[in-house]
Image: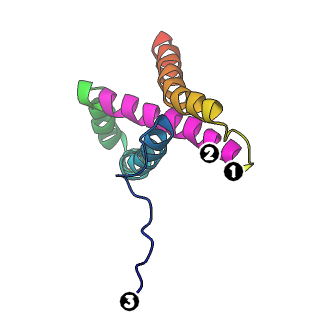
Protein backbone atom coordinates (compact mmCIF):
# COMPACT_ATOMS: atom_id res chain seq x y z
CA UNK A 1 0.00 0.00 0.00
CA UNK A 2 1.38 3.40 -0.99
CA UNK A 3 1.91 6.01 1.67
CA UNK A 4 -0.53 8.84 1.39
CA UNK A 5 0.73 12.40 1.84
CA UNK A 6 -0.28 13.92 5.14
CA UNK A 7 -2.06 17.22 5.25
CA UNK A 8 -0.32 20.06 7.09
CA UNK A 9 -1.58 20.30 10.63
CA UNK A 10 -1.03 22.43 13.73
CA UNK A 11 2.34 20.78 14.34
CA UNK A 12 3.55 22.05 10.96
CA UNK A 13 1.89 25.45 10.60
CA UNK A 14 3.39 28.35 12.53
CA UNK A 15 0.80 30.20 14.61
CA UNK A 16 0.18 33.81 13.70
CA UNK A 17 -2.32 36.58 14.31
CA UNK A 18 -4.27 35.63 11.18
CA UNK A 19 -5.07 32.23 12.69
CA UNK A 20 -6.07 33.74 16.03
CA UNK A 21 -8.37 36.33 14.46
CA UNK A 22 -10.00 33.65 12.32
CA UNK A 23 -10.74 31.55 15.41
CA UNK A 24 -11.92 34.68 17.27
CA UNK A 25 -14.27 35.41 14.35
CA UNK A 26 -15.91 32.02 14.81
CA UNK A 27 -16.12 32.37 18.59
CA UNK A 28 -17.69 35.84 18.44
CA UNK A 29 -20.15 34.66 15.79
CA UNK A 30 -21.22 31.75 17.98
CA UNK A 31 -21.48 34.02 21.02
CA UNK A 32 -23.65 36.48 19.14
CA UNK A 33 -25.85 33.68 17.87
CA UNK A 34 -26.32 31.99 21.24
CA UNK A 35 -26.13 34.74 23.86
CA UNK A 36 -27.36 37.53 21.62
CA UNK A 37 -30.37 35.53 20.49
CA UNK A 38 -31.19 34.64 24.09
CA UNK A 39 -31.08 38.28 25.19
CA UNK A 40 -33.10 39.36 22.14
CA UNK A 41 -35.79 36.76 22.77
CA UNK A 42 -35.92 37.64 26.46
CA UNK A 43 -36.29 41.33 25.57
CA UNK A 44 -39.08 40.61 23.06
CA UNK A 45 -40.86 38.37 25.56
CA UNK A 46 -40.55 41.06 28.21
CA UNK A 47 -42.04 43.62 25.82
CA UNK A 48 -44.95 41.32 25.07
CA UNK A 49 -45.38 40.35 28.74
CA UNK A 50 -46.19 43.81 29.98
CA UNK A 51 -44.72 46.29 32.41
CA UNK A 52 -43.82 43.81 35.15
CA UNK A 53 -41.98 41.50 32.76
CA UNK A 54 -40.14 44.40 31.18
CA UNK A 55 -39.11 45.75 34.59
CA UNK A 56 -37.59 42.35 35.45
CA UNK A 57 -35.65 42.39 32.17
CA UNK A 58 -34.53 45.99 32.68
CA UNK A 59 -33.41 45.29 36.25
CA UNK A 60 -31.43 42.26 35.10
CA UNK A 61 -29.74 44.12 32.25
CA UNK A 62 -28.85 47.13 34.40
CA UNK A 63 -27.30 44.94 37.11
CA UNK A 64 -23.50 44.53 37.07
CA UNK A 65 -23.78 41.08 35.49
CA UNK A 66 -26.25 42.37 32.89
CA UNK A 67 -23.92 45.21 31.95
CA UNK A 68 -21.07 42.72 31.55
CA UNK A 69 -23.28 40.67 29.22
CA UNK A 70 -24.28 43.73 27.17
CA UNK A 71 -20.72 45.03 26.93
CA UNK A 72 -19.57 41.53 25.96
CA UNK A 73 -22.19 41.32 23.25
CA UNK A 74 -21.19 44.75 21.98
CA UNK A 75 -17.52 43.73 21.92
CA UNK A 76 -18.39 40.48 20.12
CA UNK A 77 -20.45 42.41 17.57
CA UNK A 78 -17.75 44.95 16.73
CA UNK A 79 -14.95 42.37 16.76
CA UNK A 80 -16.96 40.07 14.49
CA UNK A 81 -17.77 43.01 12.22
CA UNK A 82 -14.13 44.08 11.87
CA UNK A 83 -12.99 40.51 11.28
CA UNK A 84 -15.79 40.03 8.76
CA UNK A 85 -14.67 43.13 6.87
CA UNK A 86 -11.14 41.74 6.86
CA UNK A 87 -12.43 38.44 5.44
CA UNK A 88 -14.47 40.36 2.86
CA UNK A 89 -11.32 42.12 1.61
CA UNK A 90 -9.48 38.79 1.53
CA UNK A 91 -12.34 37.26 -0.47
CA UNK A 92 -11.86 39.98 -3.07
CA UNK A 93 -8.25 38.84 -3.45
CA UNK A 94 -6.54 41.70 -1.62
CA UNK A 95 -4.56 41.79 1.60
CA UNK A 96 -2.71 38.48 1.24
CA UNK A 97 0.73 40.09 1.51
CA UNK A 98 2.27 38.93 4.78
CA UNK A 99 2.75 42.36 6.35
CA UNK A 100 -0.69 43.60 5.29
CA UNK A 101 -2.39 40.41 6.50
CA UNK A 102 -0.57 40.54 9.84
CA UNK A 103 -1.35 44.24 10.33
CA UNK A 104 -5.07 43.81 9.65
CA UNK A 105 -5.18 40.64 11.75
CA UNK A 106 -3.91 42.61 14.72
CA UNK A 107 -5.99 45.71 13.93
CA UNK A 108 -9.36 43.91 13.62
CA UNK A 109 -9.73 42.91 17.31
CA UNK A 110 -8.19 46.18 18.48
CA UNK A 111 -10.72 48.14 16.43
CA UNK A 112 -13.44 46.01 18.02
CA UNK A 113 -12.27 47.10 21.47
CA UNK A 114 -12.02 50.77 20.44
CA UNK A 115 -15.46 50.77 18.82
CA UNK A 116 -16.95 49.07 21.89
CA UNK A 117 -15.44 51.75 24.11
CA UNK A 118 -16.73 54.54 21.87
CA UNK A 119 -20.19 52.98 21.73
CA UNK A 120 -20.50 52.64 25.50
CA UNK A 121 -19.05 56.11 26.07
CA UNK A 122 -21.83 57.42 23.83
CA UNK A 123 -24.50 55.34 25.58
CA UNK A 124 -23.40 56.31 29.08
CA UNK A 125 -23.03 60.00 28.16
CA UNK A 126 -26.81 60.31 27.76
Q: Residue at x 62, y 30 (%)?
A: 99
Q: Looking at the image, is 80 positioned above or below residue 112?
A: below
Percent x, y of residue 33: 43, 52
Q: Main secondary structure of the magenta part?
A: helix
Q: Secondary structure at mark 2?
A: helix
Q: Is residue 120 magenta?
A: no
Front residue (pair 107, 34): 107
In front of the other: 83 or 92: 92
Quadrant of the image containing the N terminus: bottom left
Q: CA distance from mark 2 to mark 1?
A: 6 Å
Residues rendered magenta in the picture: 67-90
The residue at which mark 3 appears reads as: 1
Q: CA distance from mark 1 to mark 3?
A: 39 Å
Extreme bottom residue here?
Answer: 1
Task: Look at the image and tell me whether residue 49 can be seen.
Answer: no
- Callout 1: SS: helix
Residues at discs 2 and 3 in contact (Cβ within 8 Å): no
Locate residue 54: give its quadrant. top left
Q: Is residue 112 visible?
A: yes
Q: Secondary structure at mark 3?
A: loop
The residue labelled by disc 1 is: 91
- Determine the residue positioned at 43% across, 77% down: 4
Residue 87: numbered disc: 2
Q: Quadrant of residue 86?
A: top right
Say left or right for 52 vs 101. left
* Image spot of residue 46 (x, y percent): 36, 45
Amino acid sequence: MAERPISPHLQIWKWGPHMAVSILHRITGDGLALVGLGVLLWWLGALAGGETSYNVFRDAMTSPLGIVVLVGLTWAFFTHLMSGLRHFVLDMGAGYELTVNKTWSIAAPLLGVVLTGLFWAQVLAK
